[in-house]
Image: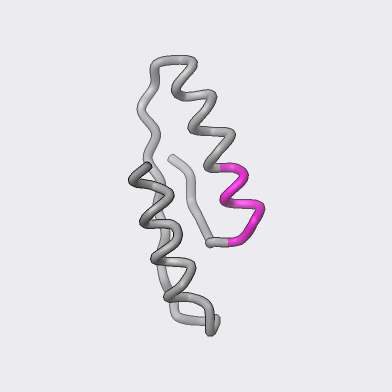
Amino acid sequence: MVALSGGLDSCLLLTLAAQVCEQAGRHLQAIHVNHGLQTAAETFKRTLKHSASV
């Protein structure tokens, strides 16, 4: 399981973890909690939702 903030570092972590899990035949889950603390929080949520579904 990967926790995502929406920042560059967590998006890179998701990408790398997805590659490793795919090679190992493992399932990957991602979680994001929108606390609404940043003005970009809704944008992060939409972007992560799209990224996770790909």
> Seen in the image, is 23 located left or right of residue 7?
left
- Residue at (37% x, 57% y) in the render: 49
Q: Is residue 12 magenta?
A: yes
Q: Quadrant of residue 6?
A: bottom right
x and y, in percent, of residue 2 in the image: 48, 44
- Residue at (39% x, 65% y) in the render: 46
How many numbered marks, from 0 up? Answer: 0
Single out the residue that lies furthest toward the top.
24
Q: How is the image coloured?
A: one colour
> Seen in the image, is 40 located left or right of residue 48?
right
- Residue at (64% x, 56% y) in the render: 8
Q: Is residue 43 above or below residue 31?
A: below
Q: State whether the magenta stretch is mostly helix, strand or loop.
A: helix
Which residue is at the front of the view, 35 or 13?
Answer: 13
- Residue at (46% x, 24% y) in the render: 21
x and y, in percent, of residue 13 in the image: 59, 42
- Quarter of the image that includes the C terminus: top left
- Quarter of the image that includes the N terminus: top left
x and y, in percent, of residue 32 in the image: 42, 59
Q: Is residue 22 above or below residue 13?
A: above
x and y, in percent, of residue 52 in the image: 39, 47
Q: Is residue 48 above or below residue 13?
A: below
Range covered by the magenta-colored residues? 7-13
